[in-house]
Each structure stands twice: as structure tokens, then as C-alpha cells.
């Protein structure tokens, strides 16, 4: 078993000695070819710390609650005034006090997440309860992480690190990516697309002055300007006729030699899209992306196929990016970039070289010390130490773990810790020899009595490594992984590999005394 484990470790560790090109061209295909992945600090790449504006999600829910309350009250012919959003609440005033009980019951039935507080004067406040707020915040963050992962996967970047930090932050690390600007463009857009009807009852003068009827909003065009060079505005109905959530595919394409983006809805979205276009022939239909009107074409005829074209001043690259964003899905809330770092490949190569030098110096110093202090037994400990390092890299390759600079520090620390077990065993054997035991008896007692001490010390260190991994992030986790693997492999090499080598030597040469 020991021989098989060591042989397997060698097979999985050897690919790390070759370049990626050599592995793909000349390395035997039937052998393991997985390599240890290098982290951001070793390979270079981009690091972003993002803040999700989860409050925007709550604002959208409250805005929707305003429309729900308006529809419910009008449906029951209950008069009201001053219906609007005020912070995280919806407020309104009934015009007739005899409707208080009916309004209370009606508004309470809108949603189980909503708390309704009314007064004897007919004033009402609607707000989300604490549980609903917490669930929506967690959902927004979780959904943001998933959408970010999809967008990054579309770019082809390998081994990305996407982690939640705190209540509203996301850490993104992309080893090997040297174009952070493109990454920021992809991650910085919410890509929330929706289809709205244009309110044709609003005059140009009222639109310019911002005098809009309830349920209508003033949105700027994405790339249209008026005669004075100012952005053109559209009066857009707030009600979402078809949501971008129903999109199942979007691709960049060309129409009349212009870059456009084609899109396709799922069955439910296609049905809604067909019904809306069928009922509103001759009316402008606005495509809104992240609060801007991409285009507002007039519906010439019903579109029943569930697909369409988004046109605008796109070039090939911008059409590709928009299609990617729509395919990956919309972020539930906008995000701010709190921290941005780019690590160049040269700096990463310097870190790798420094790590190699530190590891080599530490390894040589330990090997020489063990050889000088314990002689033959020191050679056995050195063999076990080298095997320990090979097994560590074999395990890292199998797990496809990401090696970082702190991870290299963990390996260097493991070099010293690996021979610590041998030192405890050898010193215990010395004590047993001094008490008059035979070489076989002294060695057996040394390994047996030192085991408890070695196990306790390694277990406590392993517990610390596990805690570092669970509660740490990024570099701390990299250190914890290599440290934890090193503890387990050093136990294996010290208690089994070195022991069997020494037992073989004892049975082969049967010395009268041990050279310790």
C-alpha cells in the first residue's frame, strides 16, 4: 500500500515539471496530466472587490407594491390620495374614513411579506417585514454571484475565484486575465432588459418639463440626441410588458450590414410578447436596458415567433458584449467596484522564483541537518521528506487546488514540520536504547510511544488549518490547504514510509546497536 501510494503521487506530481505545451504535444496521453493551478499572485491577473447595491432590490419591490396597491384600491373603488413611495415604505391617505376596514383587509392580502399599518385618520403605511428584507438581500447576493460566474465563464477565463464577503460584497479573482477594463464592462452592467409601451399621451412640452401622468417615467435614449446635442428622452409606461428574464438566447448578428443583437424568448415570454405586439399594432414599443431606451420601434404587425432584433449604434465588439450579458442574465442590483488590482505576469514569475528559492534553501538546510545529526537515520528521514513533498504536489494536482504565494509558505512550513515527527521518534528510540533495549525492541517502543505525541501535535495544527480555511478567504485559504495536506502527508511518511525503510534495514543487516 505504501509503495502504491508513493508511486501514484509520483505519477500525479511529474506533470508539474513540464510546460503546458510539452504536456499537450509530447507527454503520453494515458498518463495523468493535471497540473497544480497557479493563483492570481503567481500567474498574474485581475482582482476586483464588488459591492452589490442590495437596497436597489428593495426599492424595486416597494415600487411594485405601489402599483399593486393602486390596482387593488381602484378595483374595489376605494378613494385615496398621495399614493407614493417614501423611503422603504408606501404611503397613502384614504379620502373616506368609512373605507378604513376594507382598505386594511385589502392591503393586508396583497402579499404575506407586507406589513400594513393604518391610523384612525385613514393614513396607511405599507412596508416589507424583516424576514422578507433579509431573504431578498441574501437572494440578491446569491443571484449576483451566479450571474457573475456565468458572465465570466462566457469569456473563457479558467479557474476564476468568486466568493461572497460579508453581507453585500463579492470577491472576483481571475488568474491570467490582463484586461480588467473588459471585465469591468461585463460586470459593471446590470443588463436588466425589459419591454415597455411608450406613453403617446404625453406632449413634448410636458416631457421636457417632467410633467408626467401616474405610471409613466422619463427615460433617456441610449444613443439618440436632439438638435442641441442633448440626450433624447422618452415617456415610458412603468408597467413591464415583457421581462428580459424570459430570454433564453441572444446572439450577435448582422442586418443590412449593421451589427445587431438577435434574441429569443422562452414559451411563456413568447406568448406574452406575441399578445402585446398583437394588441398594440401601430404603437411604439420601447426596449429598455439598464434604465436607457435602446430603441423604440413602432409595432407594424404581431410578432408571434418569440424572437426579435435589437438594433442601435453597435459595433461588432459591443454587439458581442450585449449578447453575452443578455445570455448570462441580468444582475438583480447594480454593483460598485470598491477595490481593483492587476497583477502582471512578471511579478507573478518573480514570486514563483522567490518561492522556489525559499523552498530549496529550507529543504537543503533540513536535509543537511538531519544527515549530520542522525547519520543513517537522518538519510531515511530525508527520503521521507522528499517523498512528502512529492505527495503534496500529487495531491494538489489531483484536487486541482490553486497554489498561491501563502500556499508556498505553507509548503515551506511543512518541510520543517515533516521532520519534526522523525526527531520525536529518533529521540525516543535513543532513550529506549539507553535503558538497555535491543535495536528491534527500542525501535518498536520508539515508534509506539512517540505516536501519541505526534498525533496530538499534528491534530491540533490540522484543526487550526481547518479553521483558517473555513473562516479565511483567498490567500489565507491557500495557506490552510497546503498546510493541512502537508500535515496529513507528513504523518504518512514519518509513521509508515520511514518506519518500513528502517524495519527493512534492521532485518537485512541485524545491527548490534543503532547508529543514533
Image: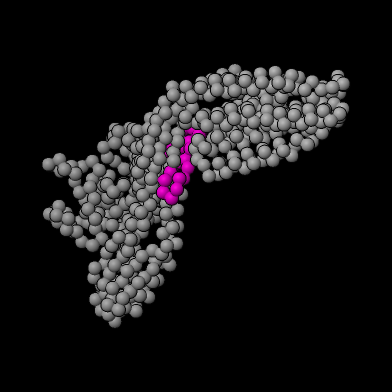
Residue at left offset 78%, top offset 33%: 447
| Rendering coords of residue 295 (x, y %) | 26, 45
For residue 100, say whether it is visible. Answer: yes
Residue 150 within the magenta-colored segment of the rendering: yes
**In what quadrant of the picture does the N terminus appear?**
top right
| Rendering coords of residue 73 (x, y %) | 31, 72
Q: Is residue 112 above or below residue 501?
A: below
Residue at left offset 58%, top offset 20%: 361
- Please name whichever residue, 362 or 59, is drawn nearer the observer in this view of the structure: 362
Residue at left offset 21%, top offset 42%: 224
For residue 264, say whether it is visible. Answer: no
- The single residue placed furthest to the bottom in the displayed view is 98
Residue 10 within the magenta-colored segment of the rendering: no
Q: How is the image coloured?
A: one colour
| Rendering coords of residue 254 (x, y %) | 33, 35
Q: Magenta residues, as a range?
A: 149-170
Q: Within the image, what quadrant is residue 276 found in?
A: bottom left
- Please name whichever residue, 324 or 249, is drawn nearer the observer in this view of the structure: 324
In the image, is 423 to the left or to the right of 514?
left
Amino acid at each position: 500500500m505504501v509503495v502504491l501510494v508513493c508511486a501514484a503521487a509520483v505519477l500525479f506530481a511529474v506533470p508539474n515539471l513540464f510546460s503546458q505545451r510539452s504536456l499537450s504535444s509530447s507527454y503520453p496521453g494515458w498518463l495523468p496530466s493535471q497540473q497544480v493551478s497557479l493563483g492570481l499572485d503567481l500567474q498574474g491577473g485581475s482582482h476586483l472587490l464588488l459591492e452589490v447595491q442590495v437596497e436597489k432590490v428593495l426599492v424595486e419591490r416597494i415600487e411594485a407594491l405601489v402599483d399593486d396597491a393602486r390596482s387593488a384600491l381602484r378595483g374595489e373603488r376605494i378613494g385615496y390620495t398621495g399614493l407614493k413611495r417614501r423611503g422603504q415604505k408606501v404611503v397613502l391617505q384614504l379620502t373616506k374614513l368609512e373605507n378604513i376596514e376594507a382598505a386594511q383587509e385589502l392591503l393586508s392580502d396583497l402579499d404575506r411579506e407586507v406589513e400594513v399599518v393604518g391610523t384612525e385618520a385613514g393614513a396607511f403605511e405599507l412596508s416589507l417585514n424583516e424576514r422578507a428584507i433579509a431573504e431578498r438581500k441574501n437572494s440578491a447576493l446569491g443571484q449576483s454571484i451566479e450571474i457573475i460566474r456565468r458572465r465570466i465563464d462566457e469569456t473563457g477565463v479558467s479557474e476564476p475565484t468568486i466568493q461572497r464577503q460579508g453581507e453585500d460584497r463579492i470577491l472576483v479573482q481571475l488568474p491570467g486575465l490582463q484586461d480588467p477594463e473588459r471585465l469591468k464592462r461585463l460586470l459593471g452592467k446590470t443588463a436588466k432588459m425589459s419591454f415597455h409601451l411608450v406613453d403617446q399621451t404625453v406632449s413634448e412640452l410636458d416631457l421636457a418639463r417632467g410633467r408626467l401622468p401616474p405610471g409613466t417615467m422619463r427615460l433617456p435614449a441610449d444613443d439618440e440626441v436632439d438638435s442641441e446635442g442633448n440626450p433624447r428622452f422618452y415617456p415610458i409606461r412603468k408597467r413591464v410588458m415583457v421581462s428580459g428574464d424570459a430570454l433564453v438566447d441572444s446572439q450577435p448578428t448582422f442586418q443590412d450590414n449593421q451589427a445587431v443583437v438577435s434574441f429569443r424568448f422562452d414559451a411563456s415570454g413568447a406568448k406574452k410578447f406575441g399578445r402585446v405586439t398583437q394588441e398594440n399594432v401601430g404603437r411604439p414599443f420601447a426596449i429598455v436596458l439598464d434604465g436607457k431606451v435602446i430603441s423604440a420601434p413602432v409595432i407594424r404587425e404581431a410578432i408571434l415567433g418569440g424572437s426579435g432584433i435589437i438594433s442601435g449604434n453597435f459595433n461588432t465588439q459591443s454587439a458581442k458584449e450585449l449578447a453575452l450579458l443578455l445570455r448570462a442574465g441580468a444582475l438583480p442590483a447594480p454593483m460598485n467596484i470598491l477595490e481593483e488590482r492587476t497583477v502582471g505576469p512578471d511579478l507573478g514569475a518573480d514570486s514563483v522564483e522567490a518561492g522556489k528559492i525559499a523552498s530549496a534553501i529550507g529543504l537543503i538546510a533540513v536535509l543537511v541537518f538531519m544527515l549530520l545529526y542522525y547519520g543513517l537515520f537522518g538519510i531515511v528521514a530525508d527520503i521521507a521528506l522528499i517523498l512528502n513533498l512529492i505527495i503534496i504536489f500529487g495531491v494538489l494536482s489531483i484536487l486541482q487546488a490553486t497554489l498561491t504565494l501563502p500556499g508556498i509558505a505553507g509548503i515551506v512550513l511543512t518541510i520543517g514540520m515533516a521532520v519534526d515527527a522523525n526527531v520525536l521518534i529518533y529521540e525516543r528510540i535513543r532513550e529506549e536504547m539507553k535503558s538497555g533495549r535491543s535495536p528491534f525492541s527500542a525501535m518498536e517502543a520508539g515508534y509506539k510511544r512517540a505516536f501519541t505525541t505526534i498525533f496530538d501535535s499534528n491534530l491540533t495544527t490540522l484543526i487550526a488549518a481547518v479553521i483558517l480555511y473555513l473562516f479565511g478567504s483567498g490567500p489565507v485559504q491557500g495557506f490552510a490547504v497546503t498546510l493541512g495536506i502537508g500535515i496529513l502527508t507528513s504523518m504518512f511518511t514519518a509513521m509508515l514510509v520511514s518506519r518500513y525503510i528502517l524495519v527493512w534495514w534492521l532485518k537485512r543487516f541485524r545491527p548490534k546497536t543503532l547508529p543514533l
